[in-house]
Amino acid sequence: MKHVKLAILLTSGLVAAAAAMQAQEKKMEAPKPGPEVQKLGYFVGTWKSEGEIKQNPFMPTGKFSSSDTCEWFAGGFHVVCRSTGTGPTGPVQSLGILAYNPEEKVYTYSGIDNSGMSTAAKGHMTGNTWTFKSEDKMGGKTYHGRYSMVTSPADSYTFKYETSEDGKKWMVMMDGKTTKAAAPEPK
C-alpha cells in the first residue's frame, strides 16, 4: 500500500510538473507584431524616388533620384530599406530601419548614409500622413528635423524634409515623390 501511495504521489507530481511546463511554454511564445507594426508593411517593396534639394546652408541644391528596396526583417517587427541613387554631390547610398516602439507608442526611424550622416527620429501616423521628428547636431549647433510623407494609393507618396533652429520656424530642404515599382509580370 505504501508503494501505491508513493506511485500516486510521484505520478501526481509528474503530471503537475508537466502542466506547469506546458503553461510556462505558452507564456514563452514569441511575440507577434501588432496592428501598429503591420502598418509599416506599406513600405515593403521596391520604390523609385525623385526630388529636389532646395537652397540651404548644409548641402548643394539640385535634383536627386534613388531606388529603394524595403523588406521585413526576420521576426516581422522592422522594415529595412536600402537605397542607392544620385544627387548633387554624386552617388548616394543609405540604410534605414523603420519600427514601432510600443512602450513610447511611436514609430522610429534609424538611418545612415555614405556621406557619414546618421539620424534617429520618432514619428506618428495620422490619417495618410507619417511625420518623423529628429534633433541632429551640425557644426556644433542643434537642428530640428521634420520628415513628412503623405501616402496616396498604395503605390506612391509625396515627401518633404524641413529643418529648424528653434523648432518653430521651418525651412524646406528637400521634397519629392516616391512611386512603387510595378511587380514583374509572371513568365
Image: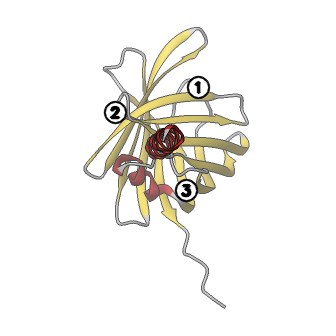
Mark 1: secondary structure: loop
Decide if residue 54 is on the left or right side of residue 60: left
**Tag of residue 105:** 2
6 or 104, which lies in front?
6
| Among the two numbered marks 2 and 3 on one chain, the one whose residue lies closer to the N terminus | 3
**Tag of residue 58:** 1
Three-letter amino acid code of the residue under disc 2? Lys
Q: Position of residue 178 (x, y in %)?
A: 49, 57
Q: Position of residue 37 (x, y in %)?
A: 41, 48
Three-letter amino acid code of the residue under disc 3? Ser
Q: Nearer the viewer, mark 1 or mark 2?
A: 2
Residue found 61% across the figure and 12% down from its top: 139
Residue occupied by mark 3: 49
Decide if residue 92 is on the left or right side of residue 164: right
Three-letter amino acid code of the residue under disc 1? Phe
Residue 181's quadrant in the figure? Answer: bottom right
The quadrant of the rendering that contains the C terminus is bottom right
Residue 172's quadrant in the figure? Answer: top left
> Real-space Cα distance between discs 1 and 3?
21 Å
